[in-house]
Image (spheres, rainbow, N blue to C red):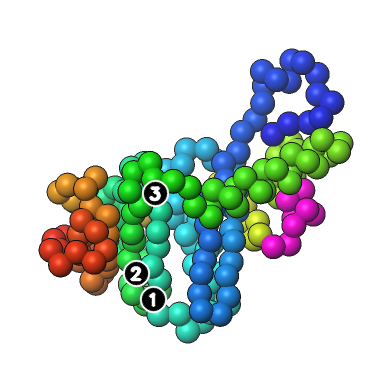
Amino acid sequence: MKEQDEIQQAHWNLKSLSIFTAFVWSKTENFPFALPSSDVTHDKFVVNSALDIILNHVESVLPNVTEINCFSDSVASQFKQRYHFRNLTRIANERNIDLSWHFFATSYGKGVVDGIGGVVKRLVWSAILAGDGCRSVEDFIKLARKKTDKIIVIEIKIDEIQKSKIKLENLFKTAKSVPETQKMHCVKVVNENELEVSYYSMCAQRKTVKY
């Protein structure tokens, strides 16, 4: 977070924020998301809070949604790990949806979500160059919304992340290590206590994980 006319010393005292980006495709509508937060840990609790925002919006606009297929990279601290897998069973059960998660090959190219993050940062930076200040997440959101109404910009609040920690603490105690996690590229929820994992999405060979 910067200002155009800041003093030299400010360079050594910059504050940071993180942006969780996502894009939702459906048969009728599409939604790009940029979710900034002052929490820069990028951990499983931030991911859960971000998914809550995204899924709540999807369900408000598409109340009859019954199936969601997610795609992401294979970052172990966020997505490709036992705690996230366990949380998927809870999400699918509470929201009564068929839910699966698919992982791209490691280090394979860029996607639309990278473009969303790049666009939002460029728009905010252009506002800063024009004289606007960006000293907080609230300032970042205000500038982004002023520059575009095409991207949904919502803050992932610290108190929501804390609520995620409290809510998921007991659930994560039941999480199990999934054999060959890094080789798996597809996770599908069977029920609230069972997952199917496979090497790739259309693979006939599947392994079951029961909690």
Q: Which residues are magenta?
A: 143-150
In the rendered image, residue 204 lying in the magenta stretch gets the answer no
Residue denoted by label 2: 99
Circle 2 residues within 10 Å: few <14, some 14–19, many ≥20: many
Q: What is the C-alpha distance between the residues marked 2 and 1? A: 6 Å
- The N terminus lies in which quarter of the figure? top right
Crowd around label 3: few <14 · some 14–19 · many ≥20 (10 Å):
some
- What number is the disc on residue 131? none
The reply, left or right, for residue 25 in relation to residue 168 is right
**Label 1 secondary element:** strand
Q: Residue at (67%, 43%) from the top-left corner?
A: 121
In the picture, measured across the screen, residue 163 lies left or right of residue 86, that is right
Marks 2 and 1: CB-CB under 8 Å? yes
Q: Say if mark 2 contacts mark 3, CB within 8 Å.
A: no
The secondary structure making up most of the magenta span is: helix
Q: Which residue is mark 3?
A: 73
Residue 156: image x %, image y %? 57, 51
